[in-house]
Image (cartoon, helix red, strand yellow):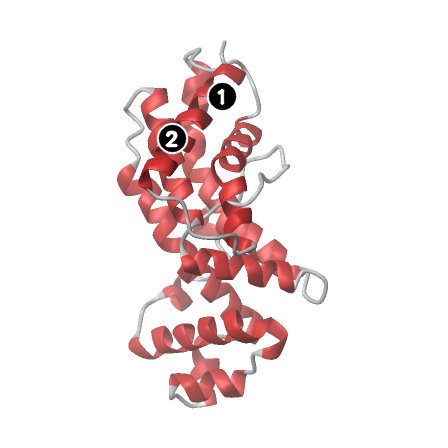
Amino acid sequence: MALQIASQRKTKPTSSDSSPLSEKRRRRSPKRDAIIAAAKDMFFQEGYAGASVDRITAQARVSKATVYSHFRSKEDLLMAVVEEVVRPIRHDYLSVLDPSTRLSDWLLKLAELLAQQVLLPDVTALERLVIAEALRFPELGRIFQTIAVDCSFELLLPRLERAIAEGEMRPCDPISAIGHFAEMCAGSLRRKMLFNEGAAPDDTEIRRHTRDVVDIFLHGYAT
């Protein structure tokens, strides 16, 4: 779900169970899905400030009352869009990463996921939205950090904590370690996509890049 630079907090990130979206409002329905899809298009095309609830309502082909029956505010709708983009990323972490594998293999698979996810069009569009609205709507950065970064990092913490406890890694702050790893995996790729600097790397380039990242990371955090 593409990750940003590490949260610098020294405590564990907020659990996904306490995500800003309540369970009631997470429930799927065709109308809710249509509203989120329309909002995503509007936010990505017009920015947060430029996207009106009236236009979102018209594109979703629902009434304004229907929109507000699912979402309390425009900010609430934006949070749902962020969640919609990052949910498949968190699902990949849970379904693809096997915590029982040795650390180097686990890191290599994670590196490939991070590199692939940061190249997704919706992830790029969402990050561009966060950057574009940073001055007018700084709260968006907090929303993105909480939903997209902190909740994702929490899913990865147990494997690194075990690696530290078992001596596979030197004692360190696992949140900082995850952040360093994520930035090495995705930082240069993210900038390339954000700045529209040519075609995305192919699978061969991604594998070469991720192998280098894992080697560097393991040497840096070696016991």
Residue type at mark 2? Answer: Arg
Identify the residue at image location x=41%, y=72%.
36
Determine whether, in the image, residue 128 is placed left or right of residue 85: right
Label 2 belongs to which residue?
A: 208
The numbered disc on residue 169 is: none
Q: Position of residue 120 (x, y in %)?
A: 40, 54
Q: Are marks 2 and 1 in contact (CB under 8 Å)?
A: no
Identify the residue at image location x=63%, y=37%.
9
Crowding around mark 2 (Cα neighbors within 10 Å: few <14, some 14 to 19, many 20+) is few
Q: Secondary structure at mark 2?
A: helix
Determine whether, in the image, residue 120 is placed left or right of residue 136: left
Q: Secondary structure at mark 1?
A: helix
Q: Choose between 39 and 151: the one closer to the eye.
A: 39
Identify the residue at image location x=52%, y=73%.
45
Q: Is residue 144 visible?
A: yes
Query: How far, Cα to Cα, is label 2 from label 1?
Result: 13 Å
Quadrant position of residue 7: top right
Q: Is residue 65 visible?
A: no
Identify the residue at image location x=32%, y=69%.
28
Q: Choose between 110 and 54: the one closer to the eye.
A: 110
Quadrant position of residue 32: bottom left
Question: Is 62 rendered above or below residue 192?
Answer: below
Q: Position of residue 178 (x, y in %)?
A: 50, 32
The numbered disc on residue 216 is: 1
Q: Position of residue 149 (x, y in %)?
A: 51, 46
